[in-house]
Image (cartoon, rainbow, N blue to C red):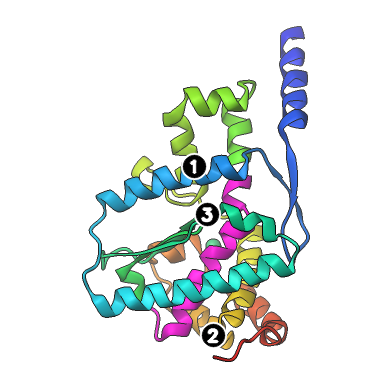
Amino acid sequence: MKFKKFVVIFIILLVFSLVSCATVPITGRKQMTLISSSQMLAMSQTSYQGLIAKAKLSKNMEKIALVKRVGERIALATGDFLKEKGMGTELKYYDWEFNLIEDEKTINAFCMPGGKIAVYSGILNLTDNEDQLAVVIGHEVAHAIAKHGNERMSQMLLVQLGGVALQKALAEKPKKTKRLYMCAFGLGAQFGVILPYSRKHEEEADHIGLILMAKAGYMPEEAVYFWQKMKNLGGVRPPEFMSTHPANDTRINNLKRLLSQARQHLKKY
Ligand SMILES: [Zn+2]
């Protein structure tokens, strides 16, 4: 009993010594992030390179160009967005990469910290136009800039590693931290787990994503059309992106409500 109490106090002290309290841009929500941005970028680079090396990359020049074009425009908009929010110093932790993975069955896309983006060709069958691809990429990039992965991984680290000092855990338990990392980004399929983001994270990613796409010159209304279409597609076995991104009326109504704010950011190309 005494020992248990000691462990609890130790963990609390550890958390307070490591914790850096970040603020999510736009929503202003305070979040706990235990992992530094440079560490996150390092983990991201390793995971992304490993994943891309194993993946079958698309050879469709037209589609590759589409993904790069939308990705680069969203990346530029993200730079402007972070600078406007007084977070320009964060840009040094971004090293943008865009890849299109040839996999018609996987309806998904992701953005790891540092702007490591992958789009699976399956999701391109669901996007009617460039703007709707910007909805998907904008949303995923928004998860990254709002540090949702870091926040989730921090929560999981606390639960699973408890009293083991974080630096030590990251250095000595690479397998475990890799698993946590992949789970934190909703990419844990290879470990048998895909955790959907929480509703709070989804709402934030929708909100920030909408602003990013408008800043990149894409029509924010397309986000409403895209999610309406996703909602109608729902069935017994919804596609991967949908199983972690439920399309419901609340989501669509929230987006509609934010349209006028997003339109103010619309950049003319
Ligand atoms: Zn999401």
Q: Which of marks 1 and 3 is nearer the N terminus?
A: 1
Q: Give the x, y percent position of residue 194.
A: 44, 49
The image's mark for residue 114 is: 3
Instruction: Mark 2 vs mark 1: give the one in front.
Output: 1
Does the CB distance between marks 1 and 3 fall below 8 Å? Answer: no
Judge by depth and name the residue closer to the eye, 93 or 142.
93
Instruction: Kindly report the distance in space between the C-alpha atoms of the residues bearing marks 2 and 3.
Output: 22 Å
Q: In which quarter of the image is the N terminus?
A: top right
Judge by depth and name the residue closer to the eye, 241 or 167.
167
Q: Residue placed at 52% from the left, 54% from the top? A: 114
Q: Quadrant of the C terminus?
A: bottom right
Q: What residue sits right under mark 1 in the picture?
A: 42
Q: Residue placed at 78% from the left, 60% from the top? A: 28
Q: Can residue 229 be seen in this view?
A: no
Q: Give the x, y percent position of residue 20.
A: 74, 41
Quadrant of res 18: top right
SS of the residue at dot 1? helix
Q: Dot 1: within a 10 Å radius of its alpha carbon, few (fewer than 14), some, or many (20 or more) residues?
A: some
Q: Is residue 122 left or right of residue 253?
A: left
Q: Earlier in the sequence, mark 2 or mark 3?
A: 3
